[in-house]
Image (cartoon, grey):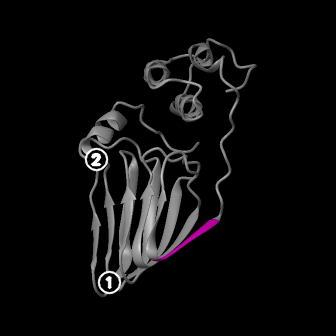
Amino acid sequence: MTDETSPELRVSYADRDRVAEQLRIAAGDGRLTLDELDERLEKALAARTAGELVTLVNDLPLTGPPAPKDLVQIDVQAASSKREGQWIVPRVLEVTVDSGSVVLDLTTAVITNPTLRIMAAVTGGSLTLVTRPGIEVDADQVKVRSGSVQVRTPPGEAPTTSLRVEVAGSVDGGSIVARPPRRSLLAWLLRRPPTYGTP
């Protein structure tokens, strides 16, 4: 949508999702309370025209989608590393875990690319992906010599996939786990508008 868009023009799933993401970023910046965020997200999901969406973000600064990095490397040796909150998901992640843990929390991450490729080398410790409805994890390309790989999907009917996570590499000890968030956070996420993918 642009400022010149007719207020009576019917909006698409992608239009609603762009506004929903702008609202979430504004809440993360402290511009909206959680109650205001919930109220506006409900209205964004139900919006039928451009005019209805514009009124939800008129008092917020314009935010364009952030550009993801092509490659991010995480190397953990006897320590821990965690990505959470409004972190920007790159196109490729190279994760090395000799011992310790790496947690990639995708529940409120900023997703601007439809695919995340993770190259993992786990020789001890763990790599954990925390997902939400709409995030699909494929770990079929991981070679397991010692340890385990487990993928658990969130309960309920899955919305359209917003992010496909392709995990490859090896586990020589330790584990790779993809799981939904704890029950209370999952209940909150299920109330949010679905993500309809990157236009």
Q: Residue at x 68, y 15 (%)?
A: 6
Asked if the stretch drawn in magenta spans residue 73, the answer is yes
| Image quadrant where one finds the C terminus | top right
Q: Earlier in the sequence, mark 2 or mark 1?
A: 1
Q: Which residue is mark 2?
A: 182
The residues colored magenta run 71-77
Determine whether 179 is above or below 112 in the image: below
Q: Which residue is mark 1?
A: 173
Point out residue 139 in the picture as x, y percentages from the top left corner: 36, 69
Left/right of residue 112 with respect to residue 13 in the rendered view:
right
Front residue of this view, candidates 37 and 154: 37
**Identity of the amino acid at label 2?**
Arg
Asked if the stretch drawn in magenta spans residue 66, the answer is no
Helix, strand or loop for disc 2: loop
How packed mark 2 is, by other alpha carbons closer than 10 Å (few <14, some 14-19, many 20 or more), is few
Rendering quarter of residue 62: top right
**Identity of the amino acid at label 1?**
Gly
Front residue of this view, candidates 77 and 91: 77
Magenta highlight: main SS:
strand
